[in-house]
Image: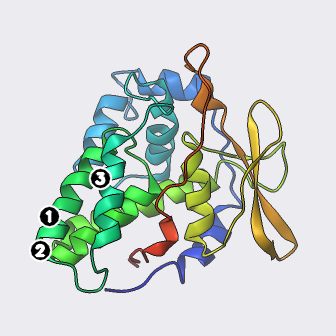
């Protein structure tokens, strides 16, 4: 299996020059218009079937998810715990068939809660590759790259006023890790923006700003969010497709 993110970083440089800050009103209108090619039920069906999607479709899928009843970012994803347990015990280079089958089942279950998680997409690319299913391996790799590009095109992340927009806290750190960059604990800058510092500056960039406002759109009353450490995205090398 090829190891990734060698040429993907170069791709990010090109795409990030064309920012597409999410317009919530427009996204809501498009995903709820049954006559629109961006109608959400059709988009999510194509996504789950592994179909090829455009950048506009990924944009509406990702940010449109915040309007769906299933979007509950403050709930614990219990299936993700199972994924972490399997990843902790298997041998990355020589996994057993049993572990890979369990990993795929657990990963698919976890995606019901977080369908656009770069970590989960990355794990499923690995799992399907290890199982010999090249069709699904490439489909999930395309989804992984599409979601990461979608986030990165939402803002340059270099200033508090131009953050990248995320729908789950972990998606911001996943994006940083996808670039093989270490990071430290995030710092809350305002009611909507978090700054995640790199372990050391890269080309004078000290870290990225992320808009996390969607996470709290439907925050339950008296809810206190406690961020937990999760399985690190960059412990597993994703796949690259040209």
Answer with the quarter of the image where residue 189 lies.
Answer: top right
Residue plotted at (38% across, 40% down): 77
In the image shown, does 195 or 4 lie closer to the viewer? 195
Q: Earlier in the sequence, mark 1 or mark 3?
A: 3
Q: Which circle marks residue 132 in the picture?
A: none
- Residue that protrudes farthest toward the right in the picture: 204
Helix or strand or loop: what does disc 3 sit on?
Answer: helix
Residue 232 position (above or below residue 96): above
Of badges 3 and 2, the one in the foreground is 3
Give the CA separation, mark 1 to mark 2: 6 Å
Residue 181 position, x and y percent, is 66, 73
Element type where label 1 sits in the image: helix
- The residue labelled by disc 3 is 82
Q: Which quarter shows the N terminus?
A: bottom left
| Image-based side of 213 in relation to 230, left or right | right
Question: Which mark is in front, 1 or 3?
Answer: 3
Looking at the image, residue 108 lies above or below residue 121: above
Residue holding disc 1: 101
Looking at the picture, how far across and down is residue 183, in whole percent? Answer: 69, 65
Report which residue position mark 2 lands on.
97
Specify whether 172 is left or right of 72. right
The reply to whether residue 50 is in sight is no
Q: Nearer the viewer, residue 140 or 176?
A: 176
Q: Is residue 232 left or right of residue 225?
A: left
What's the CA distance linking mark 3 and mark 2? Answer: 17 Å
Q: Are marks 1 and 2 in contact (CB under 8 Å)?
A: yes
Tally the numbered discs: 3
User: Which comes before the other along the chain, label 3 or label 2?
Assistant: 3
Residue 175, percent from left and from top: 58, 61
């Amino acid at each position: 299996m090829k190891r990734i993110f060698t040429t993907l970083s170069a791709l990010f440089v090109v795409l990030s020059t064309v920012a597409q800050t999410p317009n919530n009103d427009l996204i809501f209108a498009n995903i709820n218009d049954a006559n629109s090619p961006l109608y959400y039920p059709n988009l999510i069906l194509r996504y789950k079937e592994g179909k090829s999607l455009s950048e506009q479709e990924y944009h509406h899928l990702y940010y449109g998810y915040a309007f769906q009843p299933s979007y509950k970012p403050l709930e614990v994803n219990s299936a993700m715990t199972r994924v972490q347990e399997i990843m902790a015990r298997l041998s990355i280079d020589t996994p057993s068939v049993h572990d890979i089958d369990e990993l795929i089942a657990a990963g698919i279950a976890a995606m019901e809660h977080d369908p656009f998680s770069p970590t989960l997409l990355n794990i499923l690319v690995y799992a399907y590759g290890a199982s010999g299913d090249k069709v699904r391996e490439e489909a999930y790799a395309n989804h992984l790259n599409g979601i990461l590009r979608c986030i990165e095109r939402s803002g340059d992340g270099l200033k508090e006023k131009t953050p990248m927009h995320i729908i789950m806290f972990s998606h911001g750190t996943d994006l940083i890790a996808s670039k093989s960059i270490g990071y430290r604990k995030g710092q809350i800058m305002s009611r909507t923006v978090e700054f995640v510092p790199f372990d050391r500056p890269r080309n004078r960039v000290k870290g990225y700003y992320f808009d996390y406002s969607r996470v709290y759109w439907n925050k339950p009353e008296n809810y206190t969010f406690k961020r937990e450490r999760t399985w690190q995205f960059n412990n597993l090398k994703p796949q690259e497709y040209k």
